[in-house]
Structures are given as C-alpha cells and as structure tokens.
Amino acid sequence: MKELIVILAIAAATFALAKPIALRFSAPADFARRRNVWLALTIIAFLSPNFWIFALFAAPIYVWAGRKDSNPIAAYLLLMHVVPPVPIDIPTIGISQLFTLDNYRLLSFCVLIPTALRARRSIDRKRTSDSRMTDLLLFAFGVVQIALFVPPDLPDHVILQDSPTNVLRRAFLVFIDIFVLYYAISRSCSDRRKIADAEAAFCVSAGIMSLVATFEHLRTWLLYKGLALRWNPLDTNFLMAWLFRGSSWLRTQASAGHPLVLGFLLAIAFGFLLYLQSRDTLRVRLMTGIVFLCGMVVTYSRGPWIGAILIFLAYSALKPRAVSRLFKAAFLIAIVLGLIGQSSVGEKIMNSLPFAAGGQPDATLLYRQRLADRSFELMRAHPYFGDQLAIQKMEDLRQGQGIIDIVNTYIGVALFTGWVGLALFLGFILSASMGAYRVAKSTISTDLDGGLLGFNILACIVGVLFMIADCSLIFGVEKMLYVLIALAAAYARQGKQMISPVAVRNSGSIHNKR
C-alpha cells in the first residue's frame, strides 16, 4: 500500500501539471477519461494478487476506453506502461503454454485490434499507395521472422525443434506484436491533431515514470518491484532486477521493466516535447526539461543520454535556419553539461562513463566489443539468412545474469536473419522516414507547424536508430520503435491535407508565436 500511495500521489501531481499543455492537443473529455482509467488501473493492479485478476478488470476497461476515446492511439500510449510488462504464461491442455501475456498484448487485443478494424472500414483508398512500400517491407521482414526459428536459450542447453504449431504461434505473435501496432497507428492517426495528441499522451505517461524514477533514486526503493514479484516470482532475473552503476548508484526503472528501457522511453518523450512545447514560455520548458532530465540521469543508461542529445541536435538541424539553430543547440548543451558537471550528480555521471576509470574501458564496453567480434565471425559464415543456432555457439559470452545478452539490435537482426533480414528491417524504417521527410520538406514553407511535426518525428527516429545499437528490442524499446515508424507513415500518408490542431483551436497564425 505504501508503493501505491506514493505512485498515486506522483501521478495525480503529474496529471494536474500536465493538463494545461495536454489540453492544447487533447479533448478535455478524453484527457479526463484517460487520467481516471490510469489511476483506476493502478489501484486495481496493486490490489490484485495475480495478473489474471488484474486482466479480468483491465480488459473491459481497455475496451471501453478505446471505444469512447476520439483517438484510441493516444489512450494506448498513455496506458502502455501503467503496469510493468510482467510476462505471464497462458497454460493450455497438451502443451506447456500457449504464449505469454503481458500488458502490451492485453492492450493490443482490447484497444489496437478494434482500432485497426475501425480504421480499415474508414480508410481512404486513394492514400493507400503512399505507404505501400513501407507496408510490404514490414510484411517481408515479418515473414522472415516467422520462417526462421531461433531456439530459446534454455539453461540445460537443450535445442528445441520447430513444429507447425510453433510456426502458427510465431506468426500469431508477430501479427499481434508488430503488424497490429503498426497498422492501427498508421491508419487511425488520420490528421495532425491525432499525431500530436498521441505524442502528448506519451509524454504524460513518461512524465509520471520520470518522477517515479527520481523518487526511486532518492529513496533507493523500486516502487513496482513488489508488484512484479507477486505476479510472476519465477521471472525476476531480468525484469525489475536491482541493478547498480558502480557500487551504490541504483539504476531506477519505474514501470518500464529495465533502466535502459526507461532511459530509451524518456529520450523519446523529451524529443516529443521539443515540438509540443515550442509555444511555451522559457520557464515552463526549463521546468519540464528538468523533470525528464532527472529521470534520464537516474537510470544511468548512457545510450539514451546520447540519444536525447542527438534528437535535440537533429531537430535543430532539420528546422529552418539550421546553422544558427545548431550553434544555439550546441551552446545550450554545453551550458547544461557544464552545470551538471559542477554538481554532485555530475561526478556520478562522469564516473559512470565508459573510460572514467583511469582511461580503461569498463566491463560493459568490453562485453560489447567481444559480442561484435564473435557475431561478425558467425555472420560471415552465414551471411544471407543468418545462423539460428548462433546462441549455442556463443557460450563464452554468457554473463553474470546467466544470459547471452545481444545488446545491439542490428547485430541481433543480422545474426539470426542475415543480411536479408537486416536489409528488410532497415528498408522498412528508411521507407517510412523518407516519406515523412518529403512531406515535411514540401510543407515547411507554407505550413510551419505541419513541417515541424514531421521533422520532430524524424529527429526521434534518428535518436532511436542510435539507441538501438546499444540495446536489443525488449519491452518498450520494440513498441516505441514501431510506434515511431507508424507515426512517420501516418504523417506521410496525410501529406499537405493534414489539418493543424493549432489552427483549429486557436484560429490564428502560429508563426509569430514561434
């Protein structure tokens, strides 16, 4: 109950402070409903002895919220991390388990699938060709994932064999986890207001996690740890584990499931804020920036730190007057880093950098170098479609948690699906990004706000492409990667026909306000 009280207090304060900003992009009824649903589900989760009791109440609430909301994707992004992604096996007769269920998949069944079906019925067929190449590349990448079976890394080193049942299971999960998410967002975010609303909802969720993470650091208390233990006591080696940087610096994680994932999510939310708060006063932007900066710092995840800086620089470079904006951005970053360096927190940050200890790289950097060397050896031996038994050949890389951690998404994709799979994966991202860039470039001269929205999505994609080189597609990392690509595809599909939410709400030009 102590954890619940603290989380509710932090969430209530966040919703109250975020309301003036969120209402620029969200309808008041939608914001109130999402807030009430978030608070209610948090209470239900902490009072539920297991995940199934939570799901019994959460499923109808998710369905109801998705139907009532004018933009279900915004509701999805707000509720995506209302609880940690604790995996629970679905048992069935004849086999050990059907598949695992967590909050992501529960939301997919209850919110995304109904949204995708409604969007399909109302889709504009004339715009289908705008994202056809992106759709085909994603479909091809999914087919490769389904066709190539990668046995799990079991403790007893038994190599499981594939089966028709397992192929069907794999196809179903790829459809639920990837295709439904991409299709629902790319088709239902049919105007600029919905895209901006989705970004704002995600920032509210990230704001709660950032403040929770800051509290966890100050009190050395993981608020969601007890919930995860109660729901699945057998799967805690990786999810919600106590992780430290150095000897005593707790890496906080809130409801993200891992410090690296939390840093990743906060970096993206910081990127969204660059667009959403462009009309706020400097004081408001500084206060909000400090909230997200504190959350990112206490994760002690170095990749997201650099990712957030890259997003800031990329957004500045894509905007008009890029040279002067880049100079200002670099100057601002230097000031912020200088101020942090003079504080006690700055000393911790410096000590956590890879070459802080006498110029010698730390263990994590050495592990990544060894992983790259071993992976390239295996990729050269199996270049086209990868080596699905690669894990069994990398036993020398098993680390303290008992796993072989593929901490680079590009290596993971190339290792198990080959250069073909990596080309399809990167082609899917590039196709959506180029479509969004063309629209933003052609729009910026006549519609500044519309062009900046597209550049903002692209800047976040640039940061994500860097950050996934330092982590695998786990938890919210995978979800937000596909969310961003889907938002880029949705933006490209609308083109110049998108309606500005600022123009609709304020009935005035925004150019002078910028």
Image: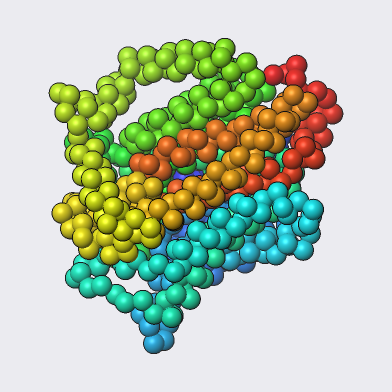
- Say left or right for 120 vs 175: right
Residue drawn 44% across and 56% down? 421
| Residue 73 locus on image (x, y percent) | 64, 51
Of residues 99 and 420, the one drawn nearer to the viewer in this rendering: 420
Of residues 441 and 512, the one drawn nearer to the viewer in this rendering: 441
| Residue 292 locus on image (x, y percent) | 47, 31
Can residue 273 be seen in the rendering of this structure? Answer: yes
| Residue 19 locus on image (x, y percent) | 65, 36
**Relative height, residue 155 to residue 477 (above, below):** below
- The extreme bottom residue here reads 94
Residue drawn 68% across and 43% down? 492
- Say left or right for 278 vs 469: right
Colouring mode (rainbow / by chain / secondary structure / one colour): rainbow
**Relative height, residue 341 to residue 146 (above, below):** above
- The extreme right residue here reads 507
Identify the image quadrant of residue 250. Answer: top left
- Say left or right for 19 vs 327: right
Of residues 205 and 461, the one drawn nearer to the viewer in this rendering: 461
Residue drawn 31% across and 61% down? 387
